[in-house]
Structures are given as C-alpha cells and as structure tokens.
Image (cartoon, rainbow, N blue to C red):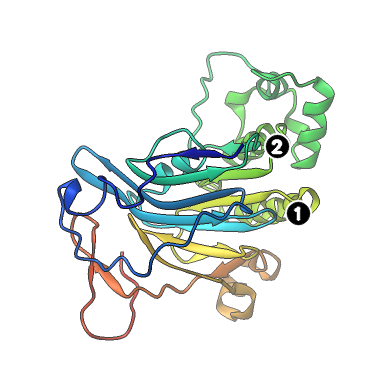
Amino acid sequence: MPQRDGAAPARSAGCGADAGHACAHEHGHPTAAIDTSALVSARDICLRRNGRQLLLDVSLDIHPREIVTLIGPNGAGKTSLVRILIGLQRPDSGEVWRPSGLRIGYVPQRFGSDTVIPMTVDRFLRLGGDFTALEAERMLNEVDASTVRERQVGELSGGEMQRVLLARALLRRPQLLVLDEPVQGVDYSGEADLYNLIARLRDASGFGVLLVSHDLHIVMARSNRVVCLNHHVCCSGLPEAVAKHPAYSQLFGPEAARAFAVYRHQHDHSHDLSGMPQPAEDGPPKEDF
C-alpha cells in the first residue's frame, strides 16, 4: 500500500489565518491530486516552527529518471522540505505520498567526521549495513573514488568526502537519490565533475534525483526541472545551457561549462522581512528573494 504522511485536509490548520498569520499572497489555482506515478508526490505542505512559517502550501512531484533541482536562499525551507519528502519530519498540514518500500539514498548537507576516531572509508561505507567489502569497493569505483578506500575518513578533502557519501547512499540501490547541497565547499571544477557523475549514474540506474543547491542562478545542466523555493514555490521551469554563453565558457572552461546551466527566475510577487510572499507592485516579473 502507498504511504501517506501528514493531515488529509490540504487547507487545515497550519496555513492561513488559522495558523496565526495573514497570508496576503494569492495561493493560485486549486491543487492537483496526488500523483501516484511519482516516486514522491507532495501537496500543500505547510510547516511552522517557533512562530515562523517555514513552508507554505508547497506541492512537488519527483518521477523516475527525473532530475529536479531545488534552489532558494538560506533559510527558505529547503532542508525542511527535503526531510518531509523523505519521511524524516512530519508537516503541520498537507500530504506526502511515497510508494511502499521506496528505497531512498540520502546525501546530507553536512557531515562532521571526528579526526580523532580512526575509521577507514571502507569501514565507514559498510557501517550499519549488510554490505560486503566487494560491494563497497565496486561502489567506490562507480563514483571514481577507488583510491580512497583505505584512507581515514577524517583525512578526506571536501570533494573526496562528497563522493564517499554518494557511494554510501548508492549502496542502498536507491530508486530516489536525494542530495542536500552536495557541492557545498567544492570548487567549480569539482562541481562540474560531480554533476556529470550524478547524470551518468542516473542514466545507468534510472533513479530519480532531488538535488538541493545553494546557488540561485547556476544549476546542473541536466536538470529536467528547477524549482525555486522561498517558503513557498516562487517559480519553476527549465534551465538554459551555460555553454551557449561565451562569458560562462571562458569562466568555467568549455568542458566544465557543459555541466552548468542558468536558471532565470520569474516571480510575480515579493517577500516581506519575515520571508512571506506579498503581492508584487505593478511591473514585469522580477527576481526577488
């Protein structure tokens, strides 16, 4: 049976006046029904913490083989939404659907490793799971990190650690791969390599990808859809290939530029100091955070 989380009424307490705030933003058209063909389908997700609205009527679908990039400013609710989508946190209202037995691989935003405690990469990969040394070695080969297998986790660089975390997530043979800001602390060259690797693994395995990015404008070129979140969904659409722009090719180099794309925001509203959406002044759509 499918798994459903959250309260059934999409407009139950958690959003609007009943939640203790006046919502001046027009919520738009009636929300579409849950999409049971998706790996994850969320409708009207609301979350409020310490008197602050973190998520407001957020709806999102992720399908097999689809790469969805979620962008937004710091504090926009991206990590909270990810936690709700994968079942680590419950919303105040709204609904999340996942097929029963869905295998999720999760690469967290931050991973603190204690350099005092000795632990090799091989041991870290197999920790808490019934994985063999051969399986761990094979997965490191898949993420182009075979040379770090016997090294201490605390000695890895940022880029090496991200590949190890990716290998650990892939050991579950996920149907949905979730990466929360995987390129944080990685330079553009490493970022391009990681984006190309994710796309190659998706092509080979067919899993869906939800990739959270801290960059508001430069995204993974292979993204099928970009969603801009600032407590609610501000806009969504397709990215534009960076390789078409000579300035970006000069900045990143012609090879790396192919991994990146530009996302152009179209916002029909603004945000107040608390981050809540407000009707925009007259004029063309603008980029507002």
In this rendering, position of residue 102 left or right of residue 56? right
Residue under the image location 68 percent in, 71 percent down = 254
Identity of the amino acid at label 1?
A: Arg
Picture coordinates of residue 63, whole percent (x, y): 63, 55
Question: Compared with residue 154, is residue 54 higher up or lower down, i.e. above or below?
Answer: below
Instruction: Pick the residue in front: 150 or 97.
Output: 97
Instruction: Pick the residue in front: 8 or 85.
Output: 8
The kind of secondary structure element at disc 1 is: helix
Instruction: Pick the residue in front: 257 or 170.
Output: 170
N-terminal of the two: label 1 or label 2?
2
Residue behind mark 1: 200
Picture coordinates of residue 12, whole percent (x, y): 29, 47
Identity of the amino acid at label 2?
A: Leu
Residue under the image location 58 percent in, 44 percent down = 178
Residue under the image location 40 percent in, 75 percent down = 266
Q: Can residue 109 be seen?
A: no
Which disc, if any, is residue 170? 2
Instruction: Pick the residue in front: 160 or 173.
Output: 173
